[in-house]
Amino acid sequence: MNMNPRHFTSLLDLSSEEFRHIIHRAIELKNNRDPNYQPLKGRVLAMIFEKSSTRTRISFEAGMVHFGGSALFLSPRDTQLGRGESMHDSAKVISSMVDCIMLRTDKHETVTTFAQYSSVPVINGLTDKQHPCQLLADMQTYFEFRGDIRGKTVAWIGDGNNMCHSYLQAAKMLDFTLHIACPAQYQPLPEFVSDAGKHVKFFDSALAAAKNADLCVTDVWASMGQEEEQKQRELAFKHYQINAEIMSSANHDALFMHCLPAHRGEEVTAEVIDGLQSVIYAEAENRLHVQKALLEFLLSI
Ligand code: CP
Ligand code: NVA
């Protein structure tokens, strides 16, 4: 047992060099799949999901199996966490039995509290504030298609949500510029904006934000837990859809990404998300490869 485990509650738990290392290692693992390479043989990942998931659950579970280990799916409904057992006790007990813990939670503080009391690495599988695993996959995808993202321009159009916050952190760490166009009442939180410093620029319109972009990214208008706001958000975001006009304002070889699940006809048109510039399926698949690289990194320290 390591009393000072490395956690991944946020991209900021990595250095810029480590971020780039994980991306390159993910590309290597993807291109040279060796079934005999099982660095996590006999190791166990506990996965706690307070919210739904397709990609996160399957990629972590499959990744652990590829590496010779296994993963446990735990929902708060079926564990004592759902009946109010403290996070302090839960983190201490669960981490005494497994080698790594992944959590997808409503509150970001749940993940950081777990990390505080866990004796094994804790991974953020999405919170209300951040989605760092998705950024690892998005950046791997950009590197694969276009090379290093340093000096490039990324346009974030839509909600200033958990994905947007993680893009703000990635912009500073990997040295790209993030153009943001969000409705006034759905801006990213000020602390994420100020930390990004000169790497972020705000625009009044989606068209202006996309100008000269190398990558255009969006996400659902109503995230998990905001379903009741769907109608009011549809009104607020109606001018923040990525469509063919927006893509034509970006560079001619710009890519389109979306963490998925997507709502065609809302934040993005079918023409764009199913079009030639879209790399959404590589992006989703890369969750598997990059999280294997992350697990290898965290568990081999
Ligand atoms: N992008 C993403 O995290 O997908 P899931 O919600 O399906 O895990
Ligand atoms: N912003 C979305 C991302 C889903 C992967 C949400 O939090 O629901």
Image (spheres, rainbow, N blue to C red):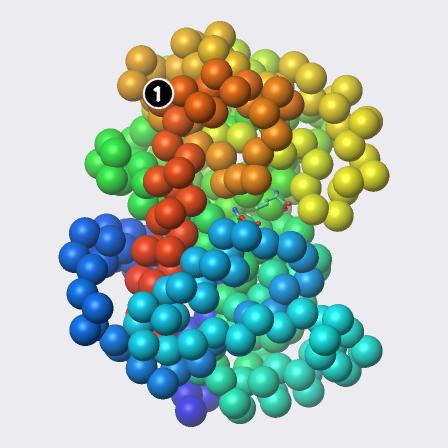
Q: Secondary structure at mark 1?
A: loop
Count of numbered labels shown in the rendering: 1
The quarter of the displayed image where residue 202 is located:
top right
Q: Is residue 10 visible?
A: no
Does residue 106 appear left or right of residue 273 in this picture?
right
The quarter of the displayed image where residue 146 is located:
top left
Q: Is residue 99 visible?
A: yes
**Residue 241 percent location from the top left of the image:** 59, 19
| Residue underneath mark 1 | 276
**Residue 111 percent location from the top left of the image:** 61, 67
Residue that appears at 58% across and 25% down: 264
Residue that appears at 76% across and 42% down: 226
Where is 90 relative to 184, above or below? below
Quadrant assignment for the C terminus: bottom left
Residue that appears at 44% across and 24% down: 274
Quadrant assignment for the N terminus: bottom left
**Residue 44 percent location from the top left of the image:** 44, 80
Q: Quick check: is the Cβ at mark 1 less than 8 Å away from ligand 1?
A: no
Does residue 260 appear left or right of residue 140 in this picture?
right
Where is 234 relative to 17, above or below? above
Residue that appears at 46% across and 48% down: 134
The quarter of the displayed image where residue 213 is located:
top left
Where is 172 relative to 297, above or below? above
Foreground residue, 114 or 60?
60
Foreground residue, 138 or 44?
44
**Residue 60 percent location from the top left of the image:** 44, 63
Mark 1: amino acid: Leu
Label 1, residues with CA under 10 Å away: few <14, some 14-19, many ≥20: few
Where is 176 relative to 112, above or below? above
